[in-house]
Image (tube, rainbow, N blue to C red):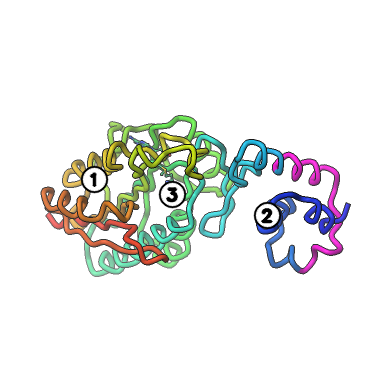
Amino acid sequence: MKLIDLLQDSILNRKISEKIAGDLLKISSEQLFLRKKNLAISPAVCKKFKKAEKAIVERGLPYQYAVGKSWFYGREFIVNKDVLIPRIETELLVQKALSFLHDRIKNLELGIRNKKITIIDVGTGTGCLAVSLYKESRKFMIRNSQFTIQLYATDISEKALSVARKNSKIHKTKIIFLKSDLLDNPKLPQKFDLVLANLPYLPSADIIPENSIYNEPKIALNGGKDGLDLIEKLIRDLPNRLAKNGLAILEIDPRQKTEIGEYTKKYQLKTIFRNDLNNRTRFAMLENKR
Ligand SMILES: C[S@@+](CC[C@H](N)C(=O)[O-])C[C@H]1O[C@@H](n2cnc3c(N)ncnc32)[C@H](O)[C@@H]1O
């Protein structure tokens, strides 16, 4: 069968059917566009496409769950119903973390003795943040071989950790994965230079069947009544768990800016908010100056 016929027969939105076909054939959307008229596809790919199409149409599954993978920061990640599908806005969190590392290395060069940088990704899900940071940081760590990074990633869900470990193996990273309620595992170091967290931050009332996120794990979405249960719990720990001049970068709901700003004052954390690509407040950057 020709790919063009498969796409034309599909009842899915054209963008989604092209995305699924591209994923199954392991070719980019540009390649797909150039080659789709003549590309012959095997019965096996055709069968997988039909199966994904059925899951999307009949069960309302996001296409990433239907094909079992998603993309984040230029890499492919395994996803299943036990993990949140990585979001494009979260890629900015990786950029901010890299910028922190870059500055930290410059400062260490200026004479600070401790040349080990300890990082944790709290609520790792697919592992997309930890894996991306590990891979991207290699690029400039190679040029600065006197520095080492120790990367931890935690999740309260054993099933999510199992997905994250698989992704870590595929991308050949050396991340330590631990089951933990936030930072509460004795195997974790006491202090971190950098804490990354995209914790569940939606108010419980937002998680309703009419909302497209409803298919994703509640444990990855539900932040309690105002969405802040876990974020506030983590903030309470930060004065003790962030090293001096350490930074925490939290992904947040734009509606939480004022409350988080008030809350962090109590804990003497210097707080700056940053926007996402839609110009909505999406990140809280909390620095421990003590
Ligand atoms: C919004 S998802 C983020 C996943 C991933 N970091 C990302 O950015 O795509 C939140 C994750 O936090 C985990 N989680 C929920 N409660 C937690 C807790 N108390 N401690 C650690 N992880 C938790 C969930 O299982 C889920 O994997």
Identified by mark 2, the residue type is Asn
* Of residues 76 and 64, the one drawn nearer to the viewer in this rendering: 64
Mark 1 or mark 3, which is nearer the start of the sequence? Answer: 3
Majority SS type along the magenta span:
helix
Label 3 to label 1, Cα distance in Å?
17 Å
Asked if residue 47 is among those painted magenta in the image, a careful observer would answer yes
Count of number-bearing discs: 3
Asked if residue 90 is among those painted magenta in the image, a careful observer would answer no
Question: Mark number for residue 250?
Answer: none
The answer to whether residue 116 shows anywhere in this view is: no
Category of crowding for the residue at label 3, using alpha-carbon neighbours closer than 10 angstroms: few (below 14), some (14–19), many (at least 20): many
Residues drawn in magenta: 34-52
Question: Mark number for residue 191?
Answer: 1
Mark 1 C-beta to ligand 1 under 8 Å: no
Category of crowding for the residue at label 1, using alpha-carbon neighbours closer than 10 angstroms: few (below 14), some (14–19), many (at least 20): some
Toward which corner of the image does residue 68 lie, by quadrant?
top right
Residue under numbered circle 2: 13
Which residue is at a point 34% across and 64% down the rendered structure image?
Answer: 275
* Of residues 170 and 252, the one drawn nearer to the viewer in this rendering: 252
Which residue is at a point 44% across and 58% down the rendered structure image?
Answer: 89
Q: Residue 123 in the image: x percent, y percent? A: 38, 41
Apparent side of residue 241 relative to residue 152 in the rendered image (left or right): left
* Secondary structure at numbered mark 3: helix
Mark 3 or mark 2, which is nearer the start of the sequence? Answer: 2
Which residue is at a point 22% across and 66% down the rendered structure image?
Answer: 111
